[in-house]
Amino acid sequence: MKHVEHKTTDIVLVACHSGSLLQSTPLGVGSLCAGLPPFCRSEILNLPPAFDIEHICEAVSALQPKLVGFSMYVWNRARLQDFAYELRTHLPDTVFVAGGPEVSCRASTWEQNSSSPLLYDIVIQGHAELLFQQVVAEVMDGIFVRPAETQVLCETATPLPESPWLNEILTPQRGVLLETARGCPFRCAYCFDARGNRAVTRIPYLRLQQELELFVAHGVEQVWVLDSSFNVPCSRGKELLRLFLEYAPELHYHLEAKAEYIDAETAQLLAQLSCSVQVGLQSVHVQVLKNVDRTLDMQRFEAGLFELYQYGVTYGIDLIYGLPGDNYAGLCESLEVALGFFPNQIELFPLALLPGTELEQRRCTYTLKALPEPPYTVISTSSMDTEGFARAAVLTAALNLFYNTGRAVSYFEVLCSACNCSGVEFLEHLGIWLQQEGAVCVESPLPDWEVKQAYRLQLEFIRTYFSQLGLENLVPAALDIMHYHYLYAETILGPPLFPVSSQDNNDTQDGSGSWALAEGVRMGKFAYPVEKYHNAGVDDLVEFVYLNAQEDCGALFHRGPHGVCCKEVPVDVVELFRSCVGASQLPAQFGCLDPAQTGKWLRDAVAKGSLFQRPSS
């Protein structure tokens, strides 16, 4: 991000991200800055969620700005509101402007009259670039007259902003946001994206090309494409994918798509990219979708996902619970259908009754009760009471833990089949267990588990649940499968392993540093030969246990030029390598391995780069 270093400045724009560092780009305020004249000195503050209000107030006050802008979103409104009140005491004469999705929903929420101290002079609703430029021009020319009451300005058009990337307002980091279009061709009643119309403004290809080239030059790794349905129409989606492939094929793209518009050619193009695609199902019930102005052509939806599956594209599905006319049983039916598509993840979340949306205007029709402040979550409807919402929240927690964070797509159906239950039934049992263990409480926010934490809970639940069902004989194989896929996924996400030359070995081994495993190496112990999981996989757990005898073994994983390598080794080799970590000298003999075997395993590991000696400090 570009910061103009001055003792004072003209404009300060304040953003506050949601906490995800890779997606923390202040693109909104960056676009505002990109349209300002060169003589206008500006500063962007991109603050973390828990920023120190007093400290930031002092910092902003020291800049003596003529105007301060606040970018309001669902996740930061309360915090920025508190900040604005405090900052107003430091800067009583500075022009305050509020904008963003949170102020674009309802003017009455932000209007203030002269009977109370004025907080915001201007509130800009809609895409703010043009109106913001006008306000800034008046402030800079000294002709802006502060109103007695908050003035609400509304931009109904969809202007095409200057690029904050190409104008060097923002500097690309590891993760970036790429705006490819504004607006949405659909009009879902719960969504504010279409802003009352179906007009879509496309970003020109030349600009996108230049931004992609800039991202590559700065070593960007991941791109979140801001386009609610990038593949509508199909021709546009294919053109975008070809653009990505031509100018930045090495980046990883996060895309939102309309499944009904995915054909074989689109899937082929996606398969050539490193990408993940999220599609919105929301519900499988036609009347429920009709209540929120959505449609579903299930035949085309299935066809689109089949194309993604056929070409090996990573994809996820969105579901919403609490939609008008839906209930807990209907949610379970939708979730079961979604699980049947074998997505890599399923995002299940409660309906939010966003102010200013069409659905909010119909709230009485469906007796929608929602939180009055962000995140505006619906808590009951005429068709789903608070108990149903509580059950749905627990089901969501179980899904997030086991299927999403736990990366269970590869073996989830195998476990369910072994338990003779459906996917939803499996998750409901998990939800009950999580509550009994105190890992989930419906009165508290749902946990955000780390992968290792989720994995431990997965293992504990399988041991408990299988034992309850009298399936103790299946537990070793079940844990094996989960362990294999855990290590496999961790290896994919880790760095590749490169062989070490003899000279490099001699240069780094001075005999005094401690030994360590390479970052990309993973190890594990298994109850059955790991090659059975790696080469063939397991489709039927009961049959697998019946046909195979237990045989303890170890396994080494690393990522090579052709994918993940999994090598079966004796258990003592795994323990040997673990014993080396932190040691200053390698052992001459270990466990049941004789000195010759020990030496050979260690020499091979050092030559392959799996084991190395850190330089002494």
Image: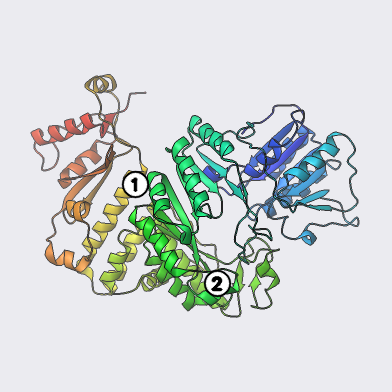
Is residue 401 rendered to the left or right of residue 235? left
Which residue does the image show at 52% across and 43% down from the upper left?
22
Depth check: give the residue in front, 212 or 73: 212
Q: Vertically, is 405 above or below 441?
A: above
Q: Residue furthest bottom?
A: 382
Which residue does the image show at 50% across and 51% down from the upper left?
235
**Res 613 quadrant in image:** top left
User: Mark 2 — residue?
Assistant: 289
Query: Which numbered disc, 1 or 2, marks the residue that appears first in the sequence?
Result: 2
Quadrant, the C terminus: top left
Q: Vertically, is 569 above or below 425?
A: above
Q: Residue furthest front?
A: 235
Viewer can see residue 323: no
Residue 85, label in figure: none
Which residue does the image show at 40% across and 51% down from the upper left?
265
Q: How is the image coloured?
A: rainbow
Mark 1 packing: few (<14 Cα in 10 Å), some, or many (20+)? some
Q: Vertically, is 186 above or below 522?
A: below
Identify residue type, mark 1.
Glu
Q: Disc 1, disc 2: CB below 8 Å?
A: no
Is label 1 or label 2 in front? 2
Q: Disc 1 versus disc 2: distance between alpha carbons?
A: 38 Å
Is residue 490 rendered to the left or right of residue 18? left
Identify residue type, mark 2.
Leu
**Res 350 quadrant in image:** bottom right
* Residue 429 image point, x, y percent: 38, 72
* Residue 229 image point, x, y percent: 54, 55
Viewer can see residue 352: yes
Q: Secondary structure at mark 1?
A: helix
Is residue 168 rendered to the left or right of residue 474? right
* Residue 366 image point, x, y percent: 64, 78
User: Mark 1 — residue?
Assistant: 490
